[in-house]
Image: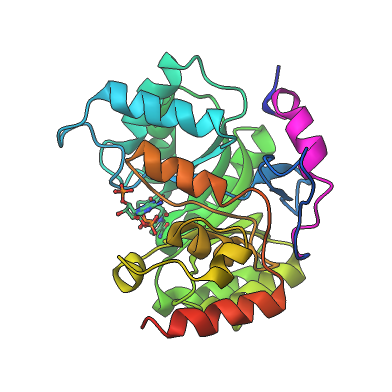
Amino acid sequence: MNRRNFIQSALVIASAASFTSSKALSGESITSAMLTNKIPSSAESIPVIGMGTNRNLTVRSGSSLADKVTLIKTFFELGGEMLDSSPMYGQSEEVIGQCLQQLNYPPQLFSTTKVWTKGKAEGIAQMRHSMKLWGLDRFDLMQIHNLVDWKTHLKTLRQWKDKGLIKHIGITTSHGRDHQELESIMKNEQLDFIQVTYNIRDREVENRLLPLALEKGIAVIVNRPFNGLFGYTQGKELPDFAKSLGCSSWAQFYLKFAVSHPAVTCAIPATSKIKHLKDNMDAGRGLLPDNQERKKMVTLFAQYL
Ligand SMILES: NC(=O)c1ccc[n+]([C@@H]2O[C@H](COP(=O)([O-])OP(=O)(O)OC[C@H]3O[C@@H](n4cnc5c(N)ncnc54)[C@H](OP(=O)(O)O)[C@@H]3O)[C@@H](O)[C@H]2O)c1
């Protein structure tokens, strides 16, 4: 059974929802379904909430591999699919591979990692090593991390895509200084995905990159959807307006803001805690704000800065 079939029933329900519309899902029977969004280039649907794996998948600092297996297992049980990693993230890929093995490779996995080195041979060796660590013979998405040697790797990635070793090609950044170059790559090259930082405080990508992604049919992954935002609202009561949008926490307020932009395909919050994971996954269910509500969210958040 492939990952599409495995979650077919949930997708049938969720695909009825228009991602850009307000109150995307309504009614008793469907409010628990995870919202999904289509990858424009492949028409494949993925849940709007995935998981990042930088810093949260280390087994050194007082947490065991069993804790990580439980974390990843819970992620899949709650409707998650996209796990995003990188050779930059220490033990992350190794721990993911061990978890997946113990969980018998859940078919709904959307495997996402990055190439983060210079040189053609080095890039190929690194991606092969990632496959070994994950225990996979193909990735759903391979991204060029932080634009590093992107011209070299893009050629390899096109060949790998033709050979079926990867399904989608992407490129990532979390730095404003890369935005101009990324914009030029998006205009001139064929990409399936970009990954950028976007949250209710860091909104620069709204100006050019997100509209361009919509225009060119490029899927968008949001990294750093929290990026220190909790520091502004810690201990502050969630306002009634946030509750009216279906949020029961500040985390959900931030995630619903990020994934309700029409260009955004999914966000990949990272957490090491089951409680936070559940909180984050719930942000991908039920209601999403419309444009007017998003503007109100920005105004409301500005009061806490
Ligand atoms: N250039 C790139 O390609 C690039 C750059 C940056 C990030 N990324 C990707 O994006 C992912 C996400 O970014 P990030 O890890 O930098 O930051 P993030 O997801 O914005 O924030 C992670 C922090 O939020 C906390 N947190 C998570 N859920 C929470 C909740 N419900 N309530 C309260 N606190 C919560 C986590 O702590 P707890 O563990 O205590 O929950 C952690 O400290 C990365 O893991 C990585 O996969 C890619």
In the visual, does 116 lie left or right of 58?
right
Q: Nearer the viewer, residue 304 or 88?
A: 304
Q: How many numbered marks appear?
A: 0
Residue 50 in sight from this viewpoint: no
Whether residue 18 appears in magenta in the rendering, the answer is yes
Q: Position of residue 281 (x, y in %)?
A: 53, 44
User: Hey, which quadrant is residue 159 in on the image?
Assistant: top right
Q: Quadrant of residue 297?
A: bottom right
Depth check, front residue: 242 or 220: 242
Residue 280 makes an appearance in the image: yes
User: Which residue is found at the position 44% from the left and 84% from the top?
Assistant: 302
State yes or no: residue 114 in magenta: no
Ligand number 1: quarter of image? bottom left
Residue at 71% across, 44% down:
31
State which region is magenta: 4-20
Q: Position of residue 12 (x, y in %)?
A: 82, 36
| Relative depth, front residue between 142 and 292 | 292
Left or right, 86 with respect to 284, comes to left
Residue 98 point in image, percent of width and height: 36, 21
Name the image quarter holding the N terminus.
Answer: top right
